[in-house]
Image (cartoon, rainbow, N blue to C red):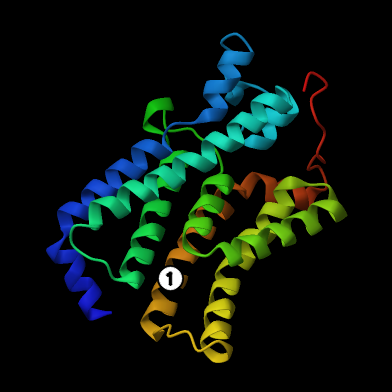
Amino acid sequence: MQSFFYFILVNWLQFLLAATASYMLGSVCFSIIFTKFFQKGEDIRHLGSKSAGFTNVLRSVGSLPAILTMIGDFLKCIVAILISKFIFSFVTTDFFTLQYISLFSGVFCSIGHVFPCWFSFRGGKSVLVSAAAILMTDWQTLLTLICIFLLMLSICKIISLSSIVVAVAYPILNVLFLVFREKFFNYAYPGYYIIGSTFFCVVIAGIVLLKHKSNMIRLLNGTEKKIKVHPRG
């Protein structure tokens, strides 16, 4: 862990560039862009639940713009991580360090998505962006989380509740999967990496949970809406 902190100090410029690029890309909110395109200038933040996210686009605008939003939000995080890894490819090839870089980039992309500089710092809830970050670091964890999400959604029909459950499960699954692989498949995952990666997982999950605060209140009050596709979809 000490060597990684030293790595940060030595390569502070690369971290600054990666953070800036990831934040700027994260700030491109496709829910706002596609809603303005399909709804002739309407702002998704003034429609439905007033959230700049996939679910509100699906409910308030339609399935096509919602699908385009999902693709755009997912891909922007992948691009951000690829750019960050390219920036660091000149200074390291270490697998664990590049995993940290991917998670680091995912955090800043999520921050950009939630607080977009291009759209008055009012963005979405970072579920799809977080999913892309997980894909780029551990696809098996993402696959498991998708299964949990779909199971919850089939039971409760509430996207926000399913997203909250998945966010809570993410750091836990990260630890379990890393320990499981090391124990049963002889993968060498150092303790510092398990701790460090889980820290990033907690940050990513925390961003999602904080943005679902209003949903949690509605869930407790029993007023959270179940999924319903806009008829124009």
The residue shown at (50%, 40%) is: 75
Q: Nearer the viewer, residue 165 or 11?
A: 11
The residue shown at (72%, 24%) is: 60
| Residue 52 can be seen, yes or no | no
Q: Is residue 5 left or right of residue 51?
A: left
| Residue 91 can be seen, yes or no | yes
Q: Secondary structure at mark 1?
A: helix
Q: For mark 1, does the 10 Å Cα neighbourhood hold few (<14), some (14 to 19), or many (20 or more) residues?
A: many
User: Residue 5 at x, y = what percent?
Assistant: 22, 72
Q: Which residue is mark 1?
A: 197
User: Residue 196 at x, y = what percent?
Assistant: 39, 73
The residue shown at (79%, 18%) is: 232
- Label tally: 1
Question: Eyeballing the image, is 233 above or below 196?
Answer: above
> What's the residue type where badge 1 is placed?
Ser
Residue found at the far right of this picture: 155
Q: Is residue 129 left or right of residue 188?
A: right
Question: Eyeballing the image, is 138 above or below 86?
Answer: below
Q: Nearer the viewer, residue 121 or 221?
A: 121
